[in-house]
Amino acid sequence: MDISTFVGLLIAFGALIGGYVIDGGRVASLVLLSPFVIVFGGTLGAVVISYGIPDTARALKALFASYSKKNQPDPEGLIQKICSMADLCRSEGLLKLQTLLSDPELETGNYLLLKEGMILATDTKNVDSMQETMETDIRSYTLSRQMEIDVFEGAGGFSPTLGIIGTVMGLVQVLSNISDAEHLTQAIAVAFIATLYGVVFANILYLPAANHLKSCLKRQTIFREMIVDGMCMLASGESSRNIENKLSLYYHAFPGCEQKYKAGIEN
């Protein structure tokens, strides 16, 4: 979990709990097992029915993987790689790229498309065909990642409804034992905890997770577009300086890279 997610969760839950405590509420009264089971379990079941176990598991895996530093795009490292390959190709020819294919870094998720581009650059002299193939790969990647986003958006839609269902179930139980007037008010309050859980889970966990994955997907897509542009320029015989200057224009899309973006413009 990165610092932004931790701070966001801390602020969100801190505001909710803090506001409740300020008005004299007891935090312990918000912690109940049965509403949690109904809302969380019901939401999970609805998601599995909608998207299947494989896609649900893949979405959870993608969410945890998105916080790993090794999965973060490195535009500066990519530009350096492509520029060094461009220098090599201008001096020894495109076929020299084949000697670089054994680089283990090319087997990681961020650089698989770069490896594909290197293979295409040595196998075909048609840059347009190479670009079309790599852009098709990007479209396929985007559609695959969108399914993971859909899972969390679906959970965000189901959760409030399951909360209402849990509340209705609680009220049914309360009304079936209405003779016990002493505990009636307390039981009604407990019944509404399910609605609270449903809304909170949706708006602080599931939907923010979907938005986080959307943000990651946008940057990963831009990173892959950098690969396509860079490899097409390399295959066209452009110099490493021209490639660096053009790819530096992408820096503004990545947090903390604005300084490099300006440097790229100036070069």
Image (cartoon, rainbow, N blue to C red):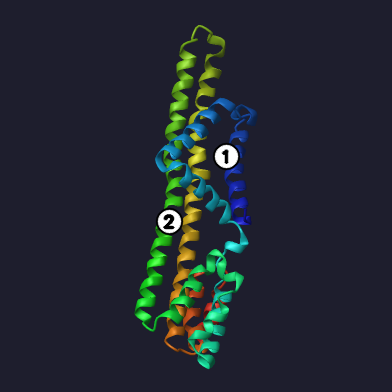
Measured as percent of width and height from the top left, residue 111 is found at: 53, 69
Between 181 and 194, which is closer to the camera in this rendering?
Answer: 194
Residue, disc 2? 144
**Residue at the spot x=39%, y=84% of the render?**
125
* Tag 1: amino acid: Leu
Per the image, label 1 sits on a secondary structure element best described as: helix
The residue sitting at the top extreme is 179
Mark 2 surroundings within 10 Å by alpha-carbon count, few (fewer than 14), some (14 through 19), many (20 or more): few
Measured as percent of width and height from the top left, residue 212 is found at: 51, 54
Count of numbered labels shown in the rendering: 2
* Quarter location, residue 155: top left
**Residue at the spot x=47%, y=60% of the render?**
217
**265 up-or-down from 210: above or below:** below
Between 198 and 87, which is closer to the camera in this rendering?
Answer: 87
Residue 120, numbered circle = none
Residue, disc 1? 16
Q: Can residue 267 be seen here?
A: no
